[in-house]
Amino acid sequence: QVSFSPNGHALMTLIISYLVVSKVNLAFDRYMQARTAIGNALSALRELHQYAITFTESDRSESAQKWRDNVKRKIFSLLDCTMHVIRDEEHATYLAKATTPSFQEDPMVYMQILRHLVYNRVKEIEK
């Protein structure tokens, strides 16, 4: 006659419960880190747009307006790209591992383009 002690099952239940709770806590921590990072990125983009407007506030020419519109379009493009990466888990994995053949939808590429755009316009204004 074979019998199992209920103490073994109780111990296994305790171990499995601990592992499940640990995994849930880790997932929640990663979620909160990502949420904070996205919030910081959105704040930085809003600040970038405000700087672009402030730096060209005195320039009322049509070229300055076109430049401001271009910056605005690039910021929206960056936001759209970021949301695309967040929604598409496979694409986000490729970007994180830097294994994707094309970085056209990489938010960091868009950010570098925006910085370059703002920096060059500020240099033009200073001249």
Image (cartoon, rainbow, N blue to C red):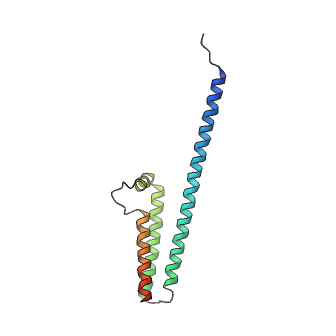
- Residue 2 position within the rendered picture, expressed as x and y whole percent measured from the top left: 59, 13
- Quick check: 65 above or below 21? below
- Residue furthest top in the image: 1
* Residue at screen point 54% across, 62% down: 38
Q: Nearer the viewer, residue 84 or 113?
A: 113
Q: Residue at x 44, y 88 (%)?
A: 126
Which residue is drawn at the image coordinates 53% and 67% (left, top)? 42
Looking at the picture, does residue 60 appear above or below residue 114?
Answer: below
Above or below, 86 against 15 in this view is below
At 42% from the left and 82% from the top, the residue drawn is 121
The x and y percentages for residue 104 are 37, 63
Between 108 and 68, the one lying in front of the other is 108
Residue 69 pos. (x, y %): 45, 79
Image quadrant assignment for residue 117: bottom left
Q: Position of residue 7 (x, y in %)?
A: 66, 24
Is 65 rendered above or below residue 34? below
Q: Quadrant of the N terminus?
A: top right
Q: Quadrant of the C terminus?
A: bottom left
Q: How many marks?
A: 0
